[in-house]
Image (tube, rainbow, N blue to C red):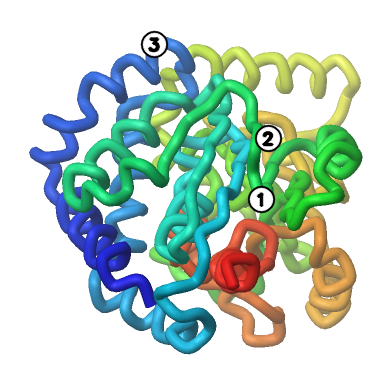
Amino acid sequence: MFTNNIQAFKQLGQNLAVPQWVDATFGEAIERQYRENSWFTPEFCRYALSAISWMLAPEALDTYLARYQDIVPDTAPRKRVAVISAGNIPLAAFHDFFCILVSGNDYQGKLSSQDKHLLPVLAQELVRIEPAFEERISFVEKVADFDAIIATGSNNSARYFDYYFSKYPHILRKNRNSVAVLNETESDQELRALADDIYLYFGLGCRSVSKLFVPRHYDFVPFLQILTQESQPIALHHQFNNNLEYQKAVHLMNQIPYMDAGTFLLVENQNYASPIGMINYEFYDDIEVVNDRLEADSELLQCIVSRDPRITRAEPFGSAQSPTLSDYPDGIDTLRWMLAIGR
């Protein structure tokens, strides 16, 4: 494939694995990002950078890219691909950035105003490693003169994206949520990993677990205790606590029962999406029925975590916020798509 591109990303991943290098390189951008968007705490920004270093580990990268070696020759013409990015979690745009560049195409990025400082620094460091990237990366206020486009937004904005960009090769992403399916055999270690799936990034990511399916008569006490302990890093965040207190007030005034885990409320609700500071749960009697429902709703779901083998597409607890390169945002193989438009 594109050997220089791959080697540059490998080196970038190795650099990102060194905390001292991350602090020296990204420290100012992290602080500025936090000042402008307090949901992006320094801890979560560094976690996002660490997650990218895991993605780009040499062995993992080689295994991932081996599936694409024969799709397109190194001489394939470059295409300019515009990306309109989400800003719900730090570096949400990285996966598209990677797929476009490693496929040999050019990246034109319109970053979210909520997440505009980290990726340019990362791009700058990539150019230091491989100067040929400089002419292939641009950040713009308005996308223009592109050959294909990837746009991520709400269900409402996706309608506008479709109207404006339908004539181009495109990937248009909508809202998705993630769920967990429990069966009462989970260990404390697995429940701690599930707590990470819930609280990291304050639950704002599409891979953040916002809904639990639990057996009827499930004993919530062990999980509530673990969730309270594990989610302490967000306990003092003022914006998060404002949302939490608001949800408590609403549920008390409307006499809606809830369980209080200190940093989250657990509320019986059939919806996949939940407000900040709240986790929905739903009882089940037959796990096969749950699986059928999740299969039918697959376009609404990004990630399912469970240890039960009867749940299709289940990922291990603790993996939701540490995706691999093959965990595509909407199930579309972005790199294969990129290589196809570049032929």
Residue 117 visible to an observer of this rendering: yes
Instruction: Mark 1 or mark 2: name the one nearer the start of the chain.
Output: 1
The mark closer to the camera, 2 or 3, is 3
Q: Is residue 250 left or right of residue 92?
A: right
Alpha-carbon span between mark 1 and mark 3: 35 Å
**Looking at the picture, which amino acid does disc 1 mark?**
Asp
Label 3: which residue? 35
The quadrant holding residue 154 is top right
Q: Quadrant of the C terminus?
A: bottom right
Label 2 close to label 3 by CB (< 8 Å)? no
Q: Mark 2 sits on what residue?
A: 278
Q: Residue at x 55, y 20 (%)?
A: 113
Q: Are marks 1 and 2 in contact (CB under 8 Å)?
A: no
Would residue 131 appear left or right of 325 to someone viewing this image? Answer: left
The residue that label 1 is drawn on is 147
Q: Could you tell whether 342 is left or right of 172 in the image?
A: left
Q: Residues within 10 Å of mark 3 (few under 14, many from 20)?
A: few
Camera-nearest residue between 107 and 284: 107
Q: Position of residue 135 (x, y in %)?
A: 36, 42
- Which secondary structure lies at badge 3? helix
